[in-house]
Image: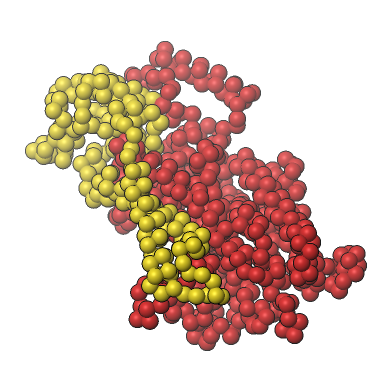
Chain colours: A yellow, B red
Amino acid sequence: MSEERKVYAIGAEFRSAADLMRAAEQVRDAGFKRWDVFTPFPVHGMDAAMGLGKSWLSAFVFVGGVTGLTTAIVLQFFTSSYLYPLIVHGKPTGLMTVPAFFPIMFELTILLSAFACVGALILLTQLPKWYHPMFNWERFSRVTDNGFYLAIEARDPKFSETKTRQFLDELGGAHITVVHD
Amino acid sequence: MSNGTTSSQTLSATQEYDDQVRRKPLVTNDRSVQWITQHVSDIAESRTPIWWWIAILITTPVAAFGLFCLAYQISTGVGVWGENHPVGWAWDITNFVFWIGIGHAGTLISAILFLTRQKWRTSINRAAEAMTIFAVICAGIFPAIHVGRVWFAWYLFPIPNSNAIWQNFRSPLLWDVFAVSTYFTVSLIFWYIGMVPDLATMRDRSKSKIGRFIYGVFALGWRGANRHWRHYEMAYLVLAGISTPLVLSVHSVVSFDFATSVLPGWHATIFPPYFVAGAIFGGFAMVLTILIPARLLYPKLKDMITAQHIDKMCKIILLTGSMVGYAYAMEFFMAWYSGSPYEIWVFLRNRVADPFIFSKIFDVPPAPYWWAYWSMIFCNVMAPQVFWFKRMRHNLWVVFIIVNLVNAGMWFERFVIIVTSLHRDFLPSSWGMFHPTWAEIGLFVGTFGIFLTLFLVFMRFVPMIAMFEIKTLLPETDPHLPPSGQGEAKEAHH
């Protein structure tokens, strides 16, 4: 790794999810803002340990669901009761036929909720991404196997190459490495 | 080091507690996180085994023959099938309902068992979701082509066209279009989103450039960041939440195709719950049909798909099978209780009256399709009753035979519902029997080829067990364990 390249972060490896969570609590308490932990699986309680609140992805899904429901109501009433009332078996076509529209209202609510869910996930995680500096760290490839990592980014206001390294060492991190962009 | 000793003492105490009081571990033999990654990925990474080639050389010609029958039907017309007055729906809709029902186990496992915190789902959800997708693909073929002129199938979608005619949104057949396409789309999304972290594992393990590229594209650059996991987990929870009513709705809507008609044998309010129970029943049977051989071929899977998992699935089969049995009994009771001669006719003279017992008791001629009805009762209601016994649930031969009976029984159920209700309706002059032709038999057999080919391909390219989910079940990943010794940690990583 060439030294001229910009420093992205300092990373440290931890032995277990439990160790990483304790380290995360201390990084949070030290007041860092631009940092993250990397784990092979979601760690229960890590959001609180990192000082992150609830994910508001569900709000996007709610909007998606309401859109789906509205679409279904408008689509069915507009076409079947107004634009082209189709009389089948002499049955009525007015507004009172709404029970027959429930299944499609339900299905479109679900469908657009699911689309909104995926869209929000893409938006909030900023994925897909072709390149990320963390992958420049050789040891990092184990993050999807059994590696537990913590990285404090250089753009954090409290970042200092020497002090942050020392801090991570105190937290019990191993293989402390400067990750370049 | 002292910390390490304490933790190992704690662990052995926990172990003792586990053995005596707590539930059995879901991953047996104390496997590590690395072991899980290694052995699940290995199924897709190692050299293609000989049996796989043999299997795919059998399934692809079958699938190809199915596609040939499909092409023959489309190019010639629906007349190549045996459907004719009075049996206007037969194997096409039977097969459609059969396959769509099989798809239900996957979404049940991934959504309902997720919301109810049934952690054992993690070993089987990926494979079951894959089965859902492949089963719905097979199912989708039938309604699409049974319309006859398949190139007009787009009329089913609400697209403004030059005739200015819109779909009949009050028709259950149109509800079905929406239900099945939504189900397929949402299942696919759920499956794929659930797979992204594991595809990242495959990317990071891949030794070839092409492998890294392809897995890399599908892994979306996943890097296990907790700032991603928290949204990811919410997305998964939300998808589980919306899929739960969805899975219950799909087969309900499918049952509306029948229940909203006025035909005796179809016109029953019990249909939606009865169909849903049957779908879950048949779906779990297919999951076991696939996973029992997979476990034999990859013995390492036995630590993840344990006897406990098979036991639990057998219990679900027993429960849903009994629910289906209750529905059969209730349908029969309602036919009698309604006092409607047509209802009684369909149930007694078209279905139940076998030549040996019931036709004698009720003094009626035997029903032409009595064998289909009694095959259904035997396979779906009687056979699963052996699962009351633990020994039977733990004998894989018994389980495998029973689940295959269930697979057959669920096909018979749909055949019974559709064909026996239609073949002798209100007008005796139009009565007749249904005889399938080679083209529809070929297409049905072909869908098994398509299904199995897709599953074999899935097994070879994608981790068939949700690695990241099963890892959270291991004791070592508990975030509340005491700290590991620090010197030890540094050494251990060299």
The residue lying toward the viewer, choosing from B206 and B445, is B445
* Outermost bottom residue: B76
Q: Position of residue A104 (x, y in %)?
A: 46, 61
* Outermost top residue: B2
Q: Could you say which quadrant of the image residue A3 lies in? A: top left
Q: Position of residue A105 (x, y in %)?
A: 44, 58
The answer to whether residue B97 of the structure is visible from this angle is no
Quick check: B136 above or below B116?
Answer: below
Quadrant of image for the N terminus of chain B: top left
Quick check: B33 above or below B292?
Answer: above
Identity of the residue drawn at 54% across and 43% down: B113
Identity of the residue drawn at 69% across and 48% down: B318
Quadrant of image for the C terminus of chain B: top left
Quick check: A155 above or below B196?
Answer: above
Q: Position of residue B282 (x, y in %)?
A: 63, 56
Quick check: B189 above or below A171?
Answer: below
